C-alpha cells in the first residue's frame, strides 16, 4: 500500500512538474532568441550608422561643390553657387595631369 501511494505521489509530482518544465524551457528559448535578435539589431544599427556617415560626407561634398539642397518639392539647385569651386578643382586637376605628362 505504501509503495502504491508513493508511486501515485511520484506520478502526480511528475505530471505537475511537466508544465513548469515546459514553461521554463519556453522562457529560456525566448530569452536566447531575444538576445540573438538584439545582437542582430546592434549589428544592423552600426551598419546603418556607418552608411549614414558616409552618405552625409558625400552629401556635404556635393553641397559644397554645387550648392544642392533638399526643398519641400524635392531637389533644388541654387544656380551655381559652388561653380567657382568646380572650376578651380578642374583647373588644378588639369594642371596636375599636364605637368605629370611632361616629366
Image (cartoon, rainbow, N blue to C red):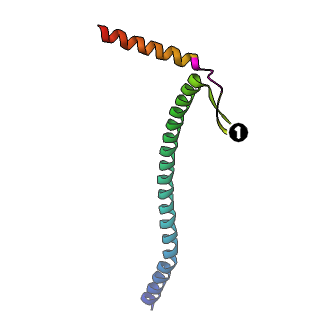
Secondary structure of the residue carrying tag 1 is: loop
Residue at 36% x, 11% y is 98
- Horizontal side, residue 19 vs residue 95: left or right: right
Q: Is residue 60 magenta?
A: no
Q: Quadrant of the C terminus?
A: top left
Which class describes the residues within 10 Å of circle 1: few (<14), some (14-19), or many (20+)?
few
Q: Quadrant of the N terminus?
A: bottom left
The front one of 61 and 82 is 82
73 shown above or below 63 = below
Our reading of the magenta stretch's main secondary structure is loop
Q: Residue 87, percent across and down?
A: 52, 16
- Horizontal side, residue 49 vs residue 74: left or right: left
Q: Which residue is mark 1?
A: 72
The front one of 11 and 56 is 56
Residue at 59% x, 20% y is 82
The residue range painted magenta reads 78-83
Q: Residue 19, percent across and down?
A: 52, 75
Amino acid at each position: 500500500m505504501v509503495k502504491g501511494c508513493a508511486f501515485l505521489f511520484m506520478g502526480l509530482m511528475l505530471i505537475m512538474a511537466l508544465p513548469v518544465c515546459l514553461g521554463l524551457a519556453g522562457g529560456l528559448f525566448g530569452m536566447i532568441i531575444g538576445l540573438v535578435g538584439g545582437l542582430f539589431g546592434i549589428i544592423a544599427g552600426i551598419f546603418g550608422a556607418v552608411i549614414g556617415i558616409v552618405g552625409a560626407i558625400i552629401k556635404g561634398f556635393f553641397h559644397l561643390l554645387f550648392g544642392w539642397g533638399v526643398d519641400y518639392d524635392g531637389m533644388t539647385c541654387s544656380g551655381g553657387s559652388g561653380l567657382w569651386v568646380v572650376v578651380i578643382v578642374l583647373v588644378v586637376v588639369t594642371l596636375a595631369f599636364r605637368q605629370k605628362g611632361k616629366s
